[in-house]
Amino acid sequence: MTQGNRKLQVGGGMQPLPAFASFVRRLELTQHKLVLFFYDTQPGDSRRTPLLLVHGLGDEADTWRHVLPALAAQRRVLAVDLPGFGRSDKPDAPYTVPWCATVLCDLLDALQIERAAVIGHSLGAITAHWLALEHPERVARLALLAGGLVASPRKPDISTLLLLTPGIGEWLYTRLRKSPQAAYDSLRPFYANLDSLPQADRDFLFRRVNERVGNDDQRRAFFRTLRALAKWLPAQQKTLASRLAECKTPTTVLWGELDHVASVENGRALAALYPPAQLTILPDAGHNLQQERPEAVIAALST
């Protein structure tokens, strides 16, 4: 199947990045009865706290492809495919933020890692933030990219409302399978300028987004996660200020100035509620800032 100058390979499942082949691990988590895929750059510098990288909704560990090598030069890095996404198992599960956080704890336990510095993007940032509040003993440092528990009241746009509607959302998602180019174009809101990315990145994303939308189990996980989050996150706002007041975890917050998915106002609100959080707004970056501005992200995370 060909679209423009791109050739879409159908079948075979989602493969790990060749450059990270030596980092690939799959581990069965007995508590949750699922196999988790992750990259592990072990051994790294054993004197430094390991990093745990957690991706956003519908994404996978490869979202960190431009920052992982530099971070791994400093310490051990784990980049996980959350259950339901990428190459991890996709069980019939609730896919709530608290459930995902317990999966991450299960992974750390299985690897005998008592504490980690946790870096999350979007949904991964929300999950990392929750983990730090619920289990502060497990999180040495926290970095939140384009996400977190603070969510200013905002009326969902029509596209989000349609995705949240059972039946209609699934129909729209499945419809993308008929047009690889339409699936690729669905990524545009997540970047300040998708067309400005290097050709290799655009080719990778074209292939990857079509692998995602073609997987029925990932579709189920996507909608369960999205709809659970839409109900759960607003309810957290009632007690969040008091919980943040008790939080002692050093926190870095990074946001793209041109983020059209998660308003930068959420980052400013978080910094206002939690003064120890260091907020950096990156110009010319959209929602996927770790892909658009990797050098700036690496610099912020390396301090």
Image (cartoon, grey):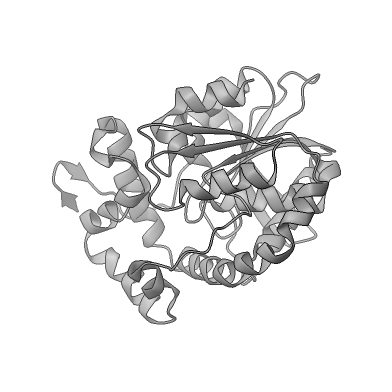
Residue 289, percent from left and from top: 44, 37
292 left or right, relative to 150: left
52 left or right, relative to 110: left
Residue 275, percent from left and from top: 69, 38
Q: Nearer the viewer, residue 34 or 188?
A: 188
Q: From this viewpoint, is residue 81 visible? A: no
252 left or right, relative to 108: left
Residue 72, percent from left and from top: 61, 23
Residue 277, percent from left and from top: 67, 36
Residue at 19% x, 53% y: name it. 1
Q: Quadrant of the C terminus?
A: top right
Q: Nearer the viewer, residue 122 or 248?
A: 248
Residue 171 vs 15, above or below: the answer is below
Residue 101 vs 158, above or below: the answer is above
Residue at 55% x, 28% y: name it. 68
Residue at 72% x, 58% y: name it. 240
Q: Nearer the viewer, residue 59 or 8?
A: 59
Q: Nearer the viewer, residue 228 or 219?
A: 228
Residue at 56% x, 66% y: name it. 225
Q: From this viewpoint, is residue 61 visible? A: yes
